[in-house]
Amino acid sequence: MCKGIRVATSHPRLIAAARDALAPLLDSGRPRIIVGIAGPPAAGKSTLATSLAHNLRARFGPDAAVAVPMDGFHLANAELERLGLADRKGAPETFDAGGFVHLLRRLRDPQERMVYAPEFNRALNESIGSAVPVSHCVRTVVVEGNYLLVPEPPWAPVRGLLDLALYIDAPRRVRVDALLRRQHARGLDRAAAHNWVHRSDEANAELIAQTRHLADLVLQRP
């Protein structure tokens, strides 16, 4: 399925490549399009998703697009502690995958006049419910997250709910540097940040890399 196209260029060119891939769907006349952007941690998924949605709104009006993050379905920290998964936050089992699938199905339902999606607040390190309103008028919903293409349950239904699946990658050094900065911002010291990134984030990245062939288009950051 994957065309294997690599766009090693600046961020505006990534947006242009994503928009070009979306163009046939925009021309199709369908009332709602769901685009998924997958990729490993710190590859640039959220930046591309928000930038693509902004670009579409600038071109076609305020109801053209909205970005919805899968990270809004992180389990609460208290629940991760109860499950013994606090040190694996970000792994597939630390998300409410069923809730995310349900959200995508609601976003596909033409009877839904307004759907509210959660988002993840990095400052709080917790999800915030009902933070992203998606009106029935919105034409394109750009969802992004690590595990959109995982073919095993409970993530398996996600791929079939996407009209277009993009995969964005970045050099490991670029990603790891960004992940270390992210963990430092959380208050972890150098040793703790390195432990988290190399033990947890990079283990997740290896799993995610196995799904890239299921994308319609692969984008590569320099």
Image: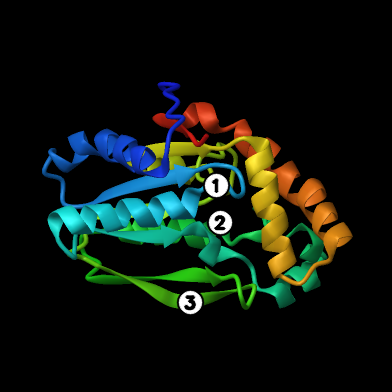
Label 3 residue SS:
strand
- Is residue 164 toward the left or the right of residue 196 in the image? left
Residue 15 horizontal/vertical position (percent) = 34, 43
- Is residue 128 toward the left or the right of residue 207 in the image? left
120 or 19: nearer the viewer: 19
User: Residue 170, labelled with which disc?
Assistant: none
Q: CA distance from mark 2 to mark 3?
A: 15 Å
Label 2 residue SS:
helix
Task: Report the amino acid beneath label 3.
Answer: Gly
Residue 123 drawn above or below residue 207: below
Residue 131 horizontal/vertical position (percent) = 42, 76
Query: Pointer 3: what residue?
Result: 129
Is mark 1 in CB contact (under 8 Å) with mark 2? yes
Sequence-first disc among 2 and 3: 2
Residue 142 horizontal/vertical position (percent) = 35, 53
Query: Pointer 2: what residue?
Result: 97
Task: Report the amino acid beneath label 1.
Answer: Trp
101 or 165: nearer the viewer: 165
- Rendered residue at 50%/43% (across/down): 38
Task: Report the amino acid beneath label 2.
Answer: Ala
Residue 132 horizontal/vertical position (percent) = 38, 71
Sequence-first disc among 1 and 2: 2
- Rendered residue at 25%/35% (across/down): 20
